Amino acid sequence: MTDENKILLHACCGICSGEPISQLKAMGYTPIVYFCNPNLSSKDEFDKRLEAQKRVCEYHDVELIVEPYSPSEFINVVQGFESEPEGGKRCTLCFKLRLLKTAYKAKSLNIRYFTTSLVISPHKNFQLITSIGQDIAAHIDELEYIAIDFKKKDGFLKTNKLSKELNLYRQNFCGCKFSIRG
């Protein structure tokens, strides 16, 4: 495979990225995982998810790029929307933040394609996330968002099976301190 096949995969956690990595490889891409999650509720949560992400990347033998934990970025973006329900405007702003950071990271690495593991969750809106990714890509030269609904063809089941095999940390909330309450 050549550099032209590289794709930057934004990863929200190890659990969600396992099957997307497999699918991207099967499609002929060379995935590079980008762990970028300023939304996480604490440094401890960030570290637990990062450790799981490292194990998944080792398992799949793929490169991992880690964006340092910077919760103030997330708080600044969602200010005024803290009380929004899960799946509301706060989440949309969070998706935009992380996909925009992913797009700029891809551009800085001369990687033409980017996507996200967020869409493997049945709790995430594929159409919304796709729309955000495509809109971002439309404003950055020579960048393309690859829309893949990773939960199709039992993707969610497969990614959970792998996470159990690897004994990964399993969180029970989306990640931000506002999602803990509901």
Image: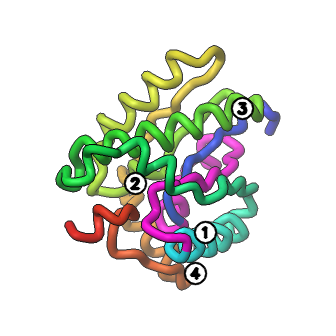
Looking at marks 4 and 3 on the same chain, the residue that comes earlier in the sequence is marked by 3
The residue indicated by pointer 3 is: 111
Could you tell me the amino acid type at mark 2? Answer: Ile
* Region of the chain picked out in magenta, as a range: 14-43
The residue indicated by pointer 4 is: 166
Judge whether residue 68 can be spotted in this image: yes
> Closer to the observer: label 4 or label 1?
1
Sort mark 3 into few (<14), some (14-19) or many (20+) by Cα contacts within 10 Å: many
Residue 55 appears in which quarter of the rendering?
bottom right
Could you tell me the amino acid type at mark 4? Answer: Leu
Q: Is residue 83 above or below residue 54?
A: above
> Closer to the observer: label 1 or label 3?
1
The residue indicated by pointer 2 is: 120
Looking at marks 1 and 3 on the same chain, the residue that comes earlier in the sequence is marked by 1
Looking at marks 2 and 4 on the same chain, the residue that comes earlier in the sequence is marked by 2
Q: Horizontal and vertical percent for residue 140?
A: 59, 18
Q: Give me the disc on residue 50.
A: 1
User: Front-most of 12 and 119?
Assistant: 12
